[in-house]
Image (tube, rainbow, N blue to C red):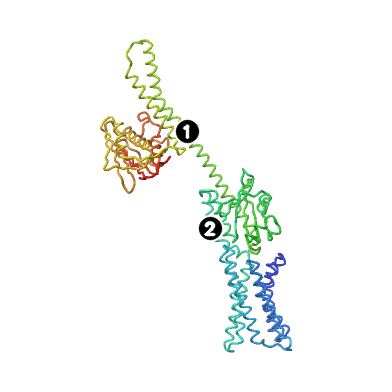
Amino acid sequence: MLIFISVALRAITRPTRAHIDMTLFFGALAFVILASRIAALTGTTATPWLTALEIAVLLAMPYVLLRLVDDFTQVRALVVRAAELGLAGGIVATYATVATQTTAATLPTPVTLYIVLYFFVVSVYCAIAFIRASHHSKGVTKRRMEAISLGSIFLGTDLLIAGLTPLTPLEDRAVFEALAQLLGLGSAVAFYLGFAPPPILRRAWQEPELRSFLARAASLPRLPATLDIVRELERGASNSTGTSARIGLWQDDTSKLRFWDDDGTTVDLEPGKHFAGRAFELQRPIFSTNPIRENPDGADGYRMRSVGAVLAAPITAGERRLGVLTLSAQRPPIFAVSDIELAGLLADQAAVVLESRALIDHAARVRAREEATRLKEDFLSAAAHDLKTPLTTVVAQAEFLERRATREPNAPADLAGIQRVVRESKRLAGLVGDLLDATRLEQGKLVGEREPVDLATLAQEVCAHGAGDETCAVEVSAPVVGVYDRRRLEQLFQNLIENARKYSPERTPIKIKVWQENGEAQIAVEDSGIGIPAADLPRIFERFSRASNVDDRRFHGMGLGLYICRGIVEEHGGRIWVESEVGKGSTFHVALPIAVGRRLN
């Protein structure tokens, strides 16, 4: 009776179909209970017409329950028509039985079994429908469907026991009657908690998912992409409300809201159109229990997605409009009045997350600009320093030769001076070449045409042509042939050998080893130089990077040699790394795939 009064008051304040069906359902229970209690208190026997009315009301309960199933999910029209025919048949059979009686009598067994069977079948169907709905639901909606499913099972079992009780021995009827009353009370409570849960219970059901969502919110701004953040926000909102959630973000370049579908495609929406656009434009939540009628432009989409109710809330950070959160459900009763406030809370949390991501992106752009500025300054400093030294030598030596030729036209040529000009010019050309190679590497165009190359022979040739002494030794066990860009592999050996010479004492041996292992060509260049500090190893192959123990006044270079080496190796599909210890030297390792195939451009 209390549940009926509570539901009836709600139907008066919000006269929706679902609330009216709830009132009819609990009203039928209340009527039967009230009639039986009045008869018990007065000691009177029900008249035939009152008996028929009570049975008719009882038969109407599973049908109203089926209507409630249709309020929360979808029931096929054929099932509804069958339930209506069953209800009509039961009422006609009951009336035909009691109409000719002057006093109340027990219904014939076939009629009783028909009523019990009808009640049981429809109740079980409703229970199965709500169980299936709970499997496709989440959050608070899932818990509501589970409660209603339990109530349907209790009610069907209760009526089955009540119908079979008259057929049981007298000494066992008291137990069955007590069990039926407990099941009846349990079904009423379960239905109430499912159909019209009190706000405090609804919040308790929402709390676990909401807490989980808020706990994850702090880490969402650092996800790899904004779309990943949107997906997590949608998942959290969906779990918290038990509905389907979508988020649209405002695009400054197109002045539209952009939604992302599950397949990655995007849909752009103008402000003011559909519920999402109107909520964004008006900056207030919009709730519709009949979106097809209230938004005819989107009717086809609502029918396709089986949307029967929509709630849209703007996502705003201060004066900045970020987007909109939309929640949709198959039927309006899935929502409650408190969901409007909850949607606003979720939208506010989404605004905090998205604004934090915007700040992180802005900070990243600032750091990127600062890093670009630093690299530019490093480049200009290194280029100015390393280009200035050979250029100064070339200019000074050329001016000296010019003055000498002017004063003494017949004097013999200064061979040492000319050689100095040639040497420094080559050094200058090498530095410019490194800069050009670094540019090609940034564009992914460093490695060109490939051909079969014997790395062992190539290492010996580079070592012999560039050493000028016997400090460079190559250890080879067998030919190692692969398909590579020969010119770039020669440059790789030259850079590694020159790097080893530069940071090692004069006449110190440089060991080069070439071999094949696990289907890869392995190269190792070992020196006994100054070594590399452990803290510098992770960035030693970066552009313009040099070890912290390098004296720029003693060891010239722009920090591009190893960077170019890494580019050559990686564009060949290989890898490069270094093992080093300060004061004891370094060993640079290269692993290249051995592939025999067509020539590549």
**Quarter of image, res 191:** bottom right
Q: Earlier in the sequence, mark 2 or mark 1?
A: 2
Q: Is residue 544 left or right of residue 258?
A: left
Q: Residues within 10 Å of mark 1 (few under 14, many from 20)?
A: few
Q: Write down the residue under mark 2.
A: 212
Proximity of marks 2 and 1: CB atoms separated by less than 8 Å: no
Residue 398 spot, x, y in % from top left: 39, 18
**Quarter of image, res 291:** bottom right
> Judging from the image, what secondary structure is the residue with disc 2 in?
helix
Three-letter code, disc 1: Lys
Name the residue rendered at 67%, 56% in the picture: 298
Name the residue rendered at 47%, 38% in the picture: 443
Work out how far the residue at label 2 is from the one at label 1, CA to CA, in angstroms.
46 Å
Residue 70 spot, x, y in % from top left: 65, 68
Which circle, 2 or 1, is nearer the viewer?
1
Q: Write down the residue under mark 1.
A: 376
Three-letter code, disc 2: Ser
